Amino acid sequence: MIPLSPRLLCCASMIQGSVVCDIGTDHAYLPAYLITSGKCSEVIATDIKTGPLESAKGTLRRYRAENGVKLVLSDGFEKVSPKGITDVVIAGMGGETIRDILAAKCADFLRKKPVNLVLQPMTKAEVLRAWLSRNGFLMTKETAVKDTHVYTVIQAHYTGDTEPLTEAETYYGKLKRTDPLTKIYIAGIQNRLHTRASGLEDSGNPEEAEAVRSLISEINRWLSKGETA
């Protein structure tokens, strides 16, 4: 059995098509799972460094998935042919890095054909959500998942419609309010924001500190409303 982590299992559950591009594949556990489970017929697995790709080769040999996975040394989509790609997974990176990969010129094909995006930011998810909404990508689903920490997995695709989020919305996105893991995820965000507010207060910026506390209150109001329709 392929040792897929809960967050990668969650990513796999959001894949819709048969040809996947896994950006930053690392050990290639997700591609091996997608091929051996029969969920996908082809996976393009990329990484920016040769070391992870060597590890990926070992994983693919171990699970006899070499025939279905193409390994590519690439910075984001730079060396990737978009032909046939139905889904893109970018997991295990910071939200700012995922944003930069999607914003690069070589990622323009995502705006020209229907591609299902599955994004799993380890940090700064609010930065990624804000960028997606400003740049025409519709977030259709989001799930909190418990791994070493509680993370979020975002499903999105390009529509061209820009709907900027409020600052509070960038922190909770499409998460379900009544999901217990959502509450844990939001509690972590609130702790970080409280720490930020205290730091601003201590450094002599009371107005900025109050703005952060107002943001916390707005997130709390959202959380207290119950599950979305």
Image (cartoon, helix red, strand yellow):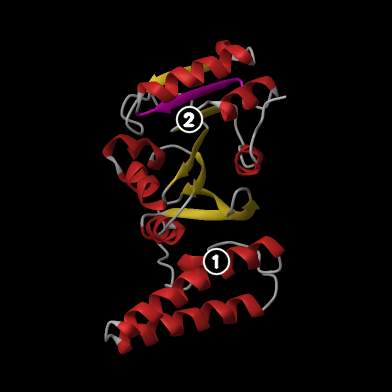
- Residue 58 x %, y %: 53, 15
Residue 220's quadrant in the figure? Answer: bottom right
In the rendered image, residue 4, in percent from the top left (x then y), is placed at 65, 33
Is residue 207 found left or right of 130 in the rendered image?
left
Residue 32 percent across, percent down from the top left: 60, 23
Can residue 144 be seen?
yes
Which amino acid type is shown beneath numbered disc 1? Gly
Say which residue label 1 marks.
188
Q: Which element type, helix, strand or loop, lies under badge 2?
A: loop
Residue at image x 63%, y 26%? 34
Position above or below: 68 against 138: above
- Secondary structure of the residue carrying numbered label 1: helix
Badge 2, how many Cα within 10 Å: few under 14, some, many 20+? many
Looking at the image, which is closer to me, 69 or 229?
Answer: 69
Say whether residue 59 is magenta. Answer: no
Quarter of the figure with residue 195 = bottom left
Q: Earlier in the sequence, mark 1 or mark 2?
A: 2
How crowded pointer 1 is (Cα within 10 Å; few <14, some 14-19, many 20+) is rated as: some
Please name the residue that numbered disc 2 is placed on: 25
